[in-house]
Amino acid sequence: MSSPSSHLLRDFREHGFATMQSFLDPAERSELEKQLSEQVLPSLHELPAEHVFYEDRQSRESLKQIQHLEAHYKWFADWMYDRPRKLAEFLLGEDVVPKNLQYFNKAPGMNQPTPPHQDGYYFMLQPPVALTMWLALDEVDETNGCLCYVPGSHRQGLRRHARTRTLGFSQGVMDYGEADKTSEIACPAQAGDLLVHHALTIHRAAKNSHPTRQRRALGFIFYGQSAREDRQRKAAYQRQLEQRLRDQKLI
């Protein structure tokens, strides 16, 4: 298990993202997998429809995303408020507010690319002091959809976004161009590795094109205590999004 270090903070501040190998050791990964398989997956039918996304609602194997694990399962809440929270405070340099613990997958044969986006567009914060942690549960590379970052993009402000057709990522950067693509850095990871990025860091992921490998991950969202959320605007956006998903029979 690694500890926060100066190079992690330097990378996060300079590039807008950082990687931490073996954030979870084998025993911790085993316990996490146990919690997912024995507590979470068998109880998905009990969760609100807007917290569970499938690529195809007729196929349980197409599970794409689970929202707010910390709100539904005590084990995940306790975990999120422990080491991940402390790391977020170390990187942001202030107290943080845990906001969301998500499960993601790109199931083989049933997935889409993740469009280039900035998490801060969804967060609607001023100032945009926040970060997302991405914990790999499987080996991830360019074949099954590793994350790709545009280094330094967190220092260039919020880019214009427009609606996409990707479930769970409804908005994407409108003017993502050749300069962005040329500077991209792909970040392969082993199970247990952690990626952390600033709310304004542009990132994307290709689809999982491997015939058999999964691409599972957990995402932790933390807001800095100094950030103020535009709750009225965010609630209106959330209502519109949920209505669109219902109209498309996706929830």
Image (cartoon, rainbow, N blue to C red):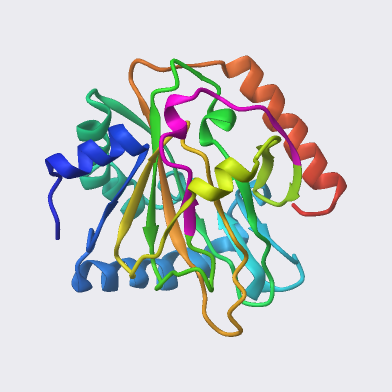
Residue 36: which quarter of the image?
Answer: bottom left
Horizontal arrangement in the rendering, residue 204 relative to residue 35 (left or right): right
**Residue under the image location 44 percent in, 30 percent down:** 154
**Residue under the image location 77 percent in, 31 percent down:** 240
> Considering only vertical position in the picture, is 187 above or below 126?
below
> Considering only vertical position in the picture, is 201 above or below 147?
above
Residue 169 part of the magenta segment: no
Horizontal arrangement in the rendering, residue 51 relative to residue 95 (left or right): right
147 or 45: nearer the eye?
Answer: 147
Query: From the image, which quarter does the N terminus lie in?
Result: bottom left
Please state the extent of the stretch shown in magenta in the rendering: 147-163
- Which percent across, then down, holds residue 219? 43, 50
Could one spot residue 199 in this view of the protein?
Answer: no
Could one spot residue 66 in this view of the protein?
Answer: yes
50 or 88: nearer the eye?
Answer: 88
- Which percent across, then down, holds residue 80? 31, 46
Give the residue furthest to the right: 247
Number of callouts in the render? 0
Horizontal arrangement in the rendering, residue 124 relative to residue 135 (left or right): right
- Which percent across, then down, holds residue 110? 69, 72
Residue 151 part of the magenta segment: yes
- Which percent across, then down, holds residue 239? 73, 30
**Residue under the image location 56 percent in, 85 percent down:** 212
